Amino acid sequence: AAGVIQSPRHLIKEKRETATLKCYPIPRHDTVYWYQQGPGQDPQFLISFYEKMQSDKGSIPDRFSAQQFSDYHSELNMSSLELGDSALYFCASSSARGDSGANVLTFGAGSRLTVL
Amino acid sequence: KQEVTQIPAALSVPEGENLVLNCSFTDSAIYNLQWFRQDPGKGLTSLLLIQSSQREQTSGRLNASLDKSSGRSTLYIAASQPGDSATYLCAVRSSDAAGNKLTFGGGTRVLVKP
């Protein structure tokens, strides 16, 4: 079965540079979520999109932005990178159709960003 | 605001022992609770999902219970194996949360010694 695809898997950037992470949800999933997991931390919710519109916003810095495109893939753009942005960034997808109680988030393998 | 706590933070057991991992949440108004496994530096693998109307879910050696009224879930892993060594995270989807986001606990780091 197709899973959530994230790219790149690893990314190394310098301080003040810009990075873009991509997420391709499971086919027919209409909702995408972004999470950030710092070293030794639990995943923290950043932002989510439903049908290409922002549906919820968490602890996402103003330097970050994201969007969901017409094919439902999503991109997380991070500018003016700081050392503290080094983390594992997870994307998850779900379908809002049907029984919302059965709505399951499926996570991608994550993109590891290292800021030097 | 939903808060999720996992106790203990770390657990070390000899191979063959049963594992008991605890998860508590502050707001009992939840849609579901999910247990994940995470290997070091790797992604999240979903283990079990318990709907708010369910009391437990089982998959192989794994059994998860849910007591929504007391805000608790327990993950049992029977006859532990060294391959079970990983961090186990529970995550709660609150029923009043827009966008279906999950709130994660801090995880329990498990080491099963051969």
Image (cartoon, coloured by chain):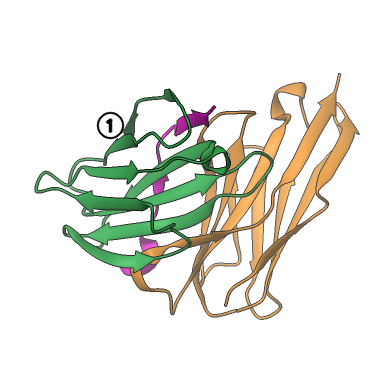
Q: Is residue B21 left or right of residue B34?
A: right
Residue A101 on the magenta segment: yes
| x, y percent for residue B8 | 83, 52
Residue reaching furthest to the front:
A16
What residue do we see at 51% from left, 71% from top? Answer: B52
Q: Is residue B19 left or right of residue B92?
A: right
Residue named by callout 1: A2
In the image, which lettered chain appears orange? B
Can residue B64 be seen? yes
Name the chain under label 1.
Answer: A
Above or below for B72 versus B75: below
Quarter holding residue B24: bottom right
Question: Which residue type carries mark 1?
Answer: Ala
Looking at the picture, tell me which residue is in the foreground, B61 or A68: A68
Quadrant in which residue A51 is drawn: bottom left
Tell whether position A108 is magenta.
yes
Comparing B17 with A48, the one in front is A48
Quarter holding the N terminus of chain B is bottom right
Q: Which range of residues does the magenta coloring cover?
A: A99-116
Mark yes or no: residue A98 visible. Answer: no
Q: In the rendered image of this protein, which colour is used for chain A?
A: green
Tally of numbered tags: 1
